[in-house]
Image: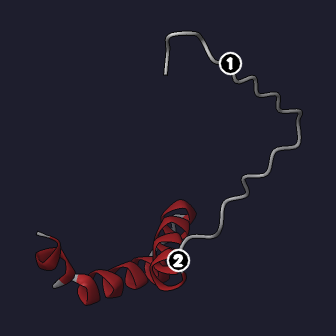
Amino acid sequence: MSSLARNHTERAIQRLAGIMDKSNDESVVVAASKVLLERGWGRPPQDNTHSGELNINIRKIKGEL
């Protein structure tokens, strides 16, 4: 199924670029631009740092693994 979708990649990118260039609706331009950038450059890395305190308690209960 994915190979069928890949056959339309070039046409889809051209269409997105056309939408981005011709639309007067800024939300449409942003959406098309985002898809094109992610397609060409990948998604930006997500920050997953933790700035709070983290406490972990591990307990072994008798008879349990």
Q: Secondary structure at mark 1?
A: loop
Number of numbered markers:
2
Residue 55 sits in quarter = top right
Q: Residue type at mark 2?
A: Gly
Residue shown at 68%/18% (left/top)? 59
Q: Any mark on residue 59, and which?
A: 1
Residue at far top of view: 62
Residue shown at 57%/65% (left/top)? 26
In the rendered image, residue 20, in percent from the top left (x then y), is placed at 47, 78
Which circle's residue, 1 or 2, is located before the other in the chain?
2
Q: Nearer the viewer, residue 13 or 6?
A: 6
The reply to whether the C-beta atoms of the residues labelled 1 and 2 are less than 8 Å apart is: no
Q: Nearer the viewer, residue 6 or 63?
A: 63
Please indicate whether residue 55 sits to the left or right of residue 19 in the image.
Answer: right
Q: Residues within 10 Å of mark 2 (few under 14, many from 20)?
A: few
Q: Nearer the viewer, residue 43 or 54?
A: 54
In the rendered image, residue 52, in percent from the top left (x then y), is placed at 88, 36
Residue shown at 75%/23% (left/top)? 57
- The correct choice, above or below, for 50 with respect to 63 in the image is below
- The correct choice, above or below, for 58 with respect to 22 in the image is above
Please indicate whether residue 42 sits to the left or right of residue 1 in the image.
Answer: right
Question: What is the C-alpha distance between the residues marked 1 and 2?
Answer: 42 Å
In the rendered image, residue 47, in percent from the top left (x then y), is placed at 73, 57
Q: Residue type at mark 1?
A: Arg
Q: Quadrant of the N terminus?
A: bottom left
Q: Secondary structure at mark 2?
A: loop
In the rendered image, residue 38, in percent from the top left (x then y), is placed at 51, 75
Residue 13 sits in quarter = bottom left
Disc 1 versus disc 2: nearer the observer: 1
Residue highlighted by disc 2: 42
Please indicate whether residue 15 sits to the left or right of residue 64 in the image.
Answer: left
Q: Nearer the viewer, residue 16 or 55?
A: 55
